[in-house]
Amino acid sequence: MAVSIAEVIVLSLIADWLLRRINIPGLIGMLLVGVLLGPYVLGYLDPDLMAIGPDLRLIALIIILLRVGFELSRSTLHRVGGRVLLLAFIPATLEGIMITVAGHWLLGLTLLESAVLGTVIAAVSPAVVVPSMIRFMKERRGAEKDIPSMVMAAASVDDIYVIVVHSVVVGLYVGNEINIAWQAVGVPLSLVLGVAVGASIGLVLYRLFDRFNPRATKRVLVIVALSIMLVRLQYVLAGYIPFAGLVSAMAIGFVILEKREHMAHEISAKLARIWVFAEIILFAMVGAQVNVGIAWRAGLAGMAVIGLGLVARGTGALLCLFRSRLNLKERLFVVVACSPKATVQAAIGAAPLMAMRAAGMDTAPGELILAVAVLSIILTAPLGAWAIAVVGNRVLEIAPESVHDAYDAATESSPDDEDLL
């Protein structure tokens, strides 16, 4: 397995470098490396590495969401909180509904299978959005109206909301007994409990770090380990108490940022470096799960489903920004910034296939769902990253230094942010 990991890293770094030279996000190269080495093409990856792929993808998702917590201050969230909640729930919901309908008619999936597809595709990619927004925060672009912070926070909560709904829909599909009314109440309750638990842990960690002053690397290891255990706790409590482990992980950083800003940005810089490795594993492992034949057959129909979903998402985003302080160009920037797909699709794209396989069901729908998920990454990640940079540079105004001191802290982030795209 060690040799397979080494080969994935070397080839992914080469692919990343080559694609960056033609202004395409490196994550596409990592994805293609996984496809090439996976069992459906060369079959070169160690089966043991394939077996732990889901855990590796989850860790990568945790790391990028941790960065969000360590970059969003309470004062900023207070200013944009209402819009964040609207942008986190409404666009994803409309996109999921559109994909459910379109997938049924265009891909031949049942409505429930299309709903599973919708919960995979509907999330925004923090791997593309978060580094881009942090870069704008460092440049103070859009700082006067808190646009980068609003987009980054909304994208993160959007991801968690979609993942929670995804687990419910997959459970329904494979035949698990689920109380729909309880799940509807459980989504907001899980978010509240997640924040409360994460904030409590963050406060304890801050006091321990402040008293014993461990090295930043050790702080990061403790936080990542606790975050993984919080996500594990979510699955242990499933069916008893709704709990969002990913929200708890983000809340840890939020509290430490409030208590000791320099410490928070030091930890965030370390997480940025870890992400360089985590990103390779995340996208290579999802690429390895792709059945190339099915992906090819999904072709135009899959593209149409993705496109219709993005239209619904964009419409939802514009509705959320009705009567906001943003002008038309800034609102269109938010629509563009909420379009890329990558991280969540890579993290959960193969989950329906694995659930169907474990339940002894026909895996063809799961393979099609995974294929369309990968297609969404290939289509929207490079275009989305490019569009965010171009539109953001043209639309977002650079605020004077006196506007929102919370943005000053972002300039202390790691210069390695550019490596995250």
Image (tube, rainbow, N blue to C red):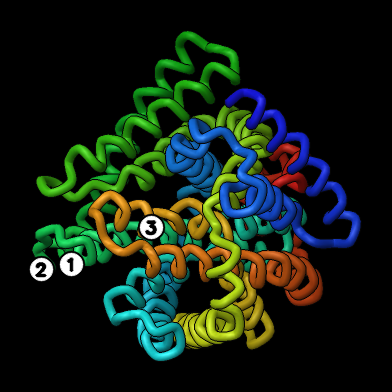
Residue denoted by label 1: 184
Q: Tell how many labels.
A: 3
Few, some or many C-alpha atoms within 10 Å of disc 3 (few <14, some 14-19, many ≥20)?
many
Regarding mark 2 in the picture, which secondary structure is present there?
A: helix
Residue denoted by label 3: 353
Residue type at mark 2?
Answer: Ala
Query: Which of the pair 189/119 is nearer the observer?
Result: 119
Question: Is there a contact, CB below 8 Å, between mark 1 and mark 2?
Answer: yes
Say if residue 131 shows up in the picture. Answer: no
Between the residue at mark 3 and the residue at mark 1, the CA separation in whole angstroms equals: 25 Å
Which numbered disc flags the more N-terminal residue, 2 or 3? 2
Residue type at mark 1?
Answer: Ala
Question: Is there a contact, CB below 8 Å, between mark 3 and mark 1?
Answer: no
The residue under the point 77% across, 48% down is: 418
Residue type at mark 3?
Answer: Leu
On screen, residue 253 versus residue 89, left or right, reads right
Question: Is 161 above or below relative to 47?
Answer: below
Between the residue at mark 2 and the residue at mark 3, the CA separation in whole angstroms equals: 26 Å
Residue denoted by label 2: 181
Q: Position of residue 179 (x, y in %)?
A: 9, 63
Query: Which of the pair 345/44 is nearer the observer?
Result: 44
Between the residue at mark 1 and the residue at mark 2, the CA separation in whole angstroms equals: 5 Å
Say if residue 72 shows up in the picture. Answer: yes
